[in-house]
Image: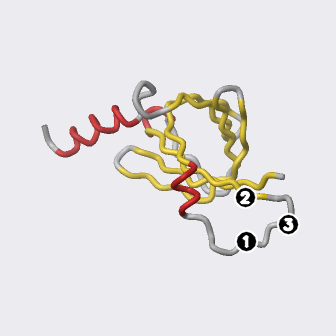
Amino acid sequence: MDFKAQCDADMAVFHNSAEFATVAGFWYDRAWHEAPAVLDHEAAAERQRKSSDNAPGVSELEALVYVAHKDLGFIPERNHEFAIKVAGVTQEYNILKVDYEDGEIILELGAYME
């Protein structure tokens, strides 16, 4: 098995809803998509900016989303709205950064919440 085949096999495990991923619904450009995704709020919190000038009572939410390109079928673009629905709860975010590595889409998302 070559390196590329091994990466594909690892990706299949990482994005398997029985292993690490959660099947999530995505609203993007007025279209609904469902795909297994790994949502990581803790890694996003570690990347938070040190200073914040949010108004009192307003907090900043951040999340990282890892999704296989073959599952989503497109690569979202920066500065678009991106809503995620998991277990009946929808949270809207703005896409702050998009990375694409070896068939995996990595989205850095941000939102403000009262």
- Residue 24: x and y in percent read 58, 31
Question: Residue at position x 57%, y 59% from top?
Answer: 97
Q: Which colour assignment does the render follow?
A: secondary structure
Q: Secondary structure at mark 3?
A: loop
Label 1 Cα crowd, 10 Å radius (few <14 / some 14-19 / many 20+): few
- Mark on residue 55? 3
Q: Which mark is residue 52?
A: 1
The disc label shown at residue 60, or none: 2
Q: Residues within 10 Å of mark 3 (few under 14, many from 20)?
A: few
Residue 72, image x, y percentages: 51, 35
Q: Determine whether label 2 and label 1 are within 8 Å by CB.
A: yes
Q: Amino acid at mark 2?
A: Glu
What's the residue type where badge 3 is placed?
Answer: Ala
Quadrant of the image occupied by residue 111: bottom right
Marking on residue 63: none
Q: Residue visible at 40% across and 29% down? A: 19
Residue at the (48%, 40%) spot, across then down: 67
Q: State the separation of the CA atoms marked 2 and 1.
A: 9 Å
Q: Residue 60: x and y, percent? A: 72, 58
Q: Along the line of sight, which residue is nearer the eye, 70 or 60?
A: 60
Q: Nearer the viewer, residue 114 or 8?
A: 114
- For mark 2, give the secondary structure: strand
Amino acid marked by disc 1: Ser
Which of the two discs, 2 and 3, labels the residue nearer the N terminus?
3
Q: CA distance from mark 2 to mark 3?
A: 10 Å
- Give how far across and how far down residue 46 sits, in percent: 54, 62
Q: Is residue 44 left or right of residue 14?
A: right
